[in-house]
Image: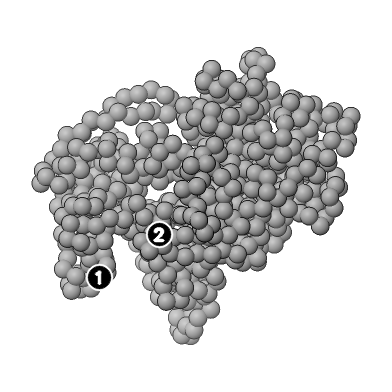
Amino acid sequence: MSDPRGQAELNTFPRLLMQHAQQRPNRPAMREKEYGIWQTYSWAEVAQNVRAIACGLAELGFKRGDRLGIIGDNRPRLYWSVAACQCLGGIPVMMYQDAVAEEMAYVLQDAEIKFAVVEDQEQVDKMLEIREQCPLLEHVIYDDSRGMRHYADTFLLGLDELQSMGTAHDKSQPDFLDGEISKGGPDDVSVMLYTSGTTGKPKGVCQTHDAFIQSAKGGCQFDKLTENEDILSYLPMAWVGDHLFSYAQAMVSGFTINCPESGETVMTDLREIGPTYYFAPPRVFENLLTTVLIRMEDASWFKRKIFAFAMDVAKRCGAEILDGKPVSTSDRFQYWLSNLLILGPLKNVLGFSRIRVAYTAGAAIGPDLFRFYRSIGINLKQLYGQTETCAYVCLQPDGQIKLDSVGKPAPGVEVKLAENGEILVKGPMLLKAYYKRPDATAESINEDGYFLTGDAGFFDEDGHLKIIDRAKDVGKLNGGSIFAPNYIENKLKFFQHVKEAVAFGNERDYVTAFINIDLEAVGNYVERRGLAYSGYTDLAAQPMVLQLIKECVEEINAQLAADPMMADSQIKRFLILHKELDADDGELTRTRKVRRKFVSERYAVLIDALYSGKSEQHIETDVKYEDGRQGKVSADLKIEEAKTFAPQAAKTAA
């Protein structure tokens, strides 16, 4: 399996893969938990499997430039299919596994996909449902054969059968695949990832081998990542963060990818693997903290006391100890004791005992949430990037962590600000094009070659970039003050009882908000106080819950009042939504970002009620259930007034 161009030009992913198969053939490249047991695949085995899949695809008629749809949870054979497609000069198109069939039809049509590799029967059924809408789709290959016994359509093929075809093809034409790999170049498109579509239809972002390899190399060097790292790959394969961390960086450095058994077992698998390198969006860190706090509420009085003591010590000096800053002997001893009794076991329960570097991105993380993880000794850092930049723009250097910044420009990246504060970036990580959208490509890159991120921000005195909000979302209150909804929403979401928030205020006299409660956290809170409820809608309407959320909002108002720039953005009125915002209902993207315009239009009657002085508003909303059924949810929503604070009174109120 030698690289036909030699080792000098490791400028495509297939060449990197073949090099690992030669240099570290027996090192673990991937693990997958199946039936409760971890299966390990060496680099030599991965290369052999990729070779079989690639030759099988060629036998089916897959050609250079063809697109291969990839749909499913994180599975070794889906990652291998990505590499196999790249070996043939094809373009893997990553698709969200939880997308409904209609959403998949759009991507299949837009990307002109002829071949798809899917995980299981669920995804096969979606392909069969939309087959007539996608006349270009010729072959669907499935990984997991469970439940597929009675599917006789020639349109379908098992991945085992494809690999057998490929092995025979490779034996009869042993030079074929090496020849195909040799035709590949660094400027070839290596993957197509679709944008989240917060403002319209998603666009296919074409990224080259060079863009992702340069981004992966920069990140590996920055954080000194080696072949000895272990990473848990559980985030959607269609998300740019997973493609950078679980595919590109693994291909560059040779570390091990671990695939969990299922979405439900991620926490158990995380503890078993004990990754050294971890990535998660803020929501995952929020959910982990919520779980910890719920467990502590149910703990004994003594355990709650020593937990509170340990957390006080951690907040006081934990982050400073992590950064190597001077700390008093007394504090250092108390932290050591806290780590022995509470913090160490807590990290072990979370699966974070071995973590050297952890990252979060995808949305701003609340400073308090960020501080919590760093204070217990987790080297959590923020990064900044988009699908169009391989998720690689800014990184936080060790020892220079700021809670409210995303760090400094990453190696090889230029960052500057436009006159209106929009962040502009340039470097090898930029997209080649939006697929079939030369107009959008031209609009996104200016005459100087800088990509327009659409985010607003500024550099602080140390050269760290601070993100305010999406440039299009930053507005002004009627009084002239800045209004940055995402900033307010993230402060609200730090509370374990708040799952989602949407703030309003642009061209208004004051700020209002919709709140989604966290069903588990709030449910536990009311149950411990003897209150029964029948579901989310019933729970959200309880006076006790309204009072709980009111206290959270007023605490945020006190914090906002202490910030001269944000003092006028205190939340004057709010309501708790009668249903959870849901991607299936179009309210969130598949990466769980709020589709702000859609939400504003769908719930216009509630926004009007917030600003018209009403104390209650009836609402009836169409919803889609997981089994495809449609229904309605209706409720009379209470609108609550929240206490606001004068700027000069902020510190005493907080």
Residue 320 locus on image (x, y percent): 47, 76
Q: Is residue 265 above or below residue 548?
A: above
Q: Is residue 645 above or below residue 247?
A: below
Residue 383 locus on image (x, y percent): 51, 60
Residue matched to label 1: 564
On-image quarter of the C terminus: bottom left
Secondary element type, mark 1 = loop
Residue 358 locus on image (x, y percent): 54, 60
Residue matched to label 2: 422
- Hey, which quadrant is residue 534 in on the image? top left
Residue 300 in view in this figure: no
On-image quarter of the N terminus: top right
Q: Amino acid at mark 1?
A: Pro
Distance between mark 2 and mark 1 Cα atoms: 22 Å
Residue 427 locus on image (x, y percent): 58, 59
Between disc 2 and disc 1, whose residue precedes?
2
Residue 97 in view in this figure: yes
